[in-house]
Amino acid sequence: MGSVTKEELENLAVNLKKVQDKFLNDWTGETFRKARLEDKEDHENILTKGKEEMRHLEETINQYHFQSEKNLEVLRQRAEEVAKLERELRELQISAERLVEQRNQNQKHFEETESQLRKRQEEISAKEQSTSYKIKQFTKGTEYFKERLGLSFKKVDEEHLQFVFKYIDPKDEDKPFVFTVAITSQDKYKVKDCIPEVKGLSEMVEKLNSTNNFSAFVVAMRGKFKDLVEKEN
């Protein structure tokens, strides 16, 4: 390699100076300022666009949030309505169960009452038959008593028969001597309204219930009335 001449060195220095001047002019002068302005504008445009996009995004998020709150409120209202309907349904079910239970109780009560009524009717019918039979027994041979002893009687009601004797007091043969016979719920004889009163009536009724001989009782009652008249006379 040959030696570098002074002239070549000077030319190199001049070229380097041109390159340096061009570099400084391009990157530190007007070109650099314009590039910086363009970069700033691009940056500002990017920032503005980014802010606008963020604003739209924020509005969209707010709309979603508002709609979500609205939907949530609708869901809460529907949940309350469903809960209310469920409560009403439970109340209706309870009412229906109570009605069914009440109906069953009423049906049971009705059946029990109907059974008791039938039993009571049977008892009444049996009692009426028994009373009717006894009254018929009372009336047997009444013609004899009526003609010979001045006895008459009348039916007061279904359970009472009144007996009236005459021809007992020789001073007043039409004077009535009265007693009333009743049939108790135990199918026993009971004497009431005995006019005039006679002694030993309770014992006579007790004997009547033990013997069931009503004809003998009627004769005995006439004897009691006759004894009273004889004592008075």
Image: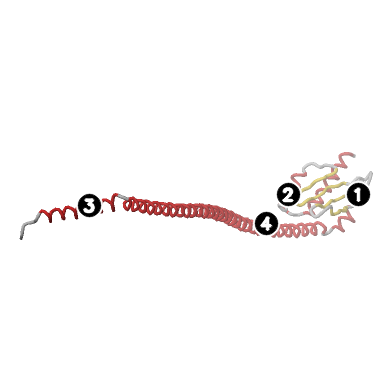
Residue 14 in percent (x, y) is at 18, 53
> Which one is nearer the viewer's eye here, 183 or 102?
102
> Which residue of the protein is positioned furthest toward the top in this rendering?
232
Could you tell whether 86 is left or right of 53 in the image? right
Q: What amino acid type is highlighted by mark number 4?
A: Thr
Q: What amino acid type is highlighted by mark number 2?
A: Lys
Q: What amino acid type is highlighted by mark number 1?
A: Tyr
Q: What amino acid type is highlighted by mark number 3?
A: Gln
Element assignment for label 2: helix
Query: Image point 64% across, 58% down: which residue?
Result: 103
The N terminus, quarter of image: bottom left
> Which one is nearer the viewer's eye here, 145 or 52?
52
Query: Image point 88% across, 53% down: which residue?
Result: 152
> Which one is nearer the viewer's eye here, 222 or 140?
140
Could you tell whether 37 is left or right of 87 in the image? left
The residue singled out by tag 2 in the image is 207
Mark 3 Cα shell of 10 Å, populated few (<14), some (14-19), many (≥20): few
Residues at discs 1 and 4 in contact (Cβ within 8 Å) = no
The residue singled out by tag 3 in the image is 20
Distance (Cα) linking label 2 and label 3: 166 Å
Residues at discs 4 and 2 in contact (Cβ within 8 Å) = no
The tag earlier along the polypeptide, 3 or 4, is 3
Mark 1 Cα shell of 10 Å, populated few (<14), some (14-19), many (≥20): some
The residue singled out by tag 1 in the image is 167
The residue singled out by tag 4 in the image is 113
Distance (Cα) linking label 4 and label 2: 39 Å
> Which one is nearer the viewer's eye here, 166 or 122?
122
The tag earlier along the polypeptide, 2 or 3, is 3
